[in-house]
Image (cartoon, rainbow, N blue to C red):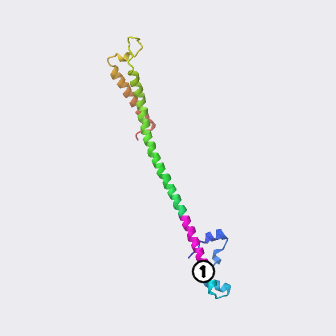
């Protein structure tokens, strides 16, 4: 049985080097007290055993606190991993929405079917022979331009 010298010095201001080894404890106490009485020796031995139990209990409590801290760290790691995955999913969904919102606007604008007979300013492209391919080309151009911009910013791709 060895006691932690620094811990004893810190807690009790005791110079541990002045304390005799525990193997000689009974003989030392008998010499100090000057009695060979077994009850005194048993009380001293019991006190040493109780100190040993207290030290073991203290170490177990410290181990428990260490394990609790480790569990807390693992839980934080798990939650941050889940958060990172959620952020990746949100990033993909945001990019998809960002691309399709302008496309929906263009499709909605050309889907209003204003007649050019009422006013010459009412979407002449709807009466144009290449109006539909033109609208599709604009949508494709907008989508590709946004993808290119996202790639330049490093938001998608490697």
* Residue at the spot 50% in from the left edge and 52% down from the top edge: 76
Above/below status of 86 relative to 140: below
Residue in front for this viewpoint, 49 or 102: 49
Tell me which residue sits at (34%, 19%) in the image.
131
Residue 47 coordinates in the image, percent (x, y): 61, 77
Task: Please name the residue shown 35% across and 22% down the image.
Answer: 134
Q: Is residue 94 left or right of residue 31?
A: left
Q: Is residue 132 above or below residue 6?
A: above
Q: Residues within 10 Å of mark 1 (few under 14, many from 20)?
A: some
Residue 148 visible in the picture: no
Indicate yes or no whether the magenta region holds residue 59.
yes
Question: Where is residue 110 shown, x and y percent of the image?
Answer: 38, 21
| Quadrant assignment for the N terminus | bottom right
Please state the horizontal and vertical placement of residue 138, each as a whole percent of the image. Answer: 38, 25
**Left or right of residue 81: residue 61:** right
SS under mark 1: helix
Q: Residue at x 42, y 30 (%)?
A: 101
Give the quadrant of residue 143: top left
Q: Image quadrant for the C terminus?
A: top left
Q: Does residue 9 appear in this view?
A: yes
Which of the 4 quarters of the picture holds residue 26? bottom right
Q: Which residue is mark 1?
A: 45
Q: Where residue 130 sits: x, y (%)?
A: 32, 19
Q: Residue furthest left?
A: 129
| Vertical position of residue 101 compared to residue 48: above or below | above
Q: Is residue 83 above or below residue 48?
A: above
Q: Main secondary structure of the magenta part?
A: helix
Residue 130, magenta (yes or no) = no
The stretch of residues the image draws in magenta is 42-63
Write down the quadrant of residue 124 in the picture. top left
Q: Residue furthest front?
A: 39
């Amino acid at each position: 049985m060895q006691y932690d010298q620094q811990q004893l010095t810190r807690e009790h201001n005791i110079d541990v080097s002045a304390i005799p080894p525990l193997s000689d404890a009974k003989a030392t106490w008998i010499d100090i007290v000057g009695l060979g009485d077994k009850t005194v020796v048993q009380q001293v031995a019991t006190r040493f055993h109780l100190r040993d139990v207290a030290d073991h209990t203290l170490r177990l409590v410290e181990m428990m606190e260490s394990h609790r801290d480790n569990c807390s760290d693992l839980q934080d790691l798990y939650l941050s991993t889940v958060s990172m995955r959620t952020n990746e999913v949100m990033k993909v969904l945001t990019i998809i929405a960002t691309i399709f919102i302008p496309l929906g606007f263009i499709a909605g604008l050309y889907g209003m079917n204003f007649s050019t007979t009422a006013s010459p300013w009412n979407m002449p492209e709807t009466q144009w022979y290449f109006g539909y391919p033109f609208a599709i080309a604009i949508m494709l151009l907008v989508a590709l331009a946004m993808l290119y911009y996202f790639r330049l910013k490093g938001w998608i791709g490697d």
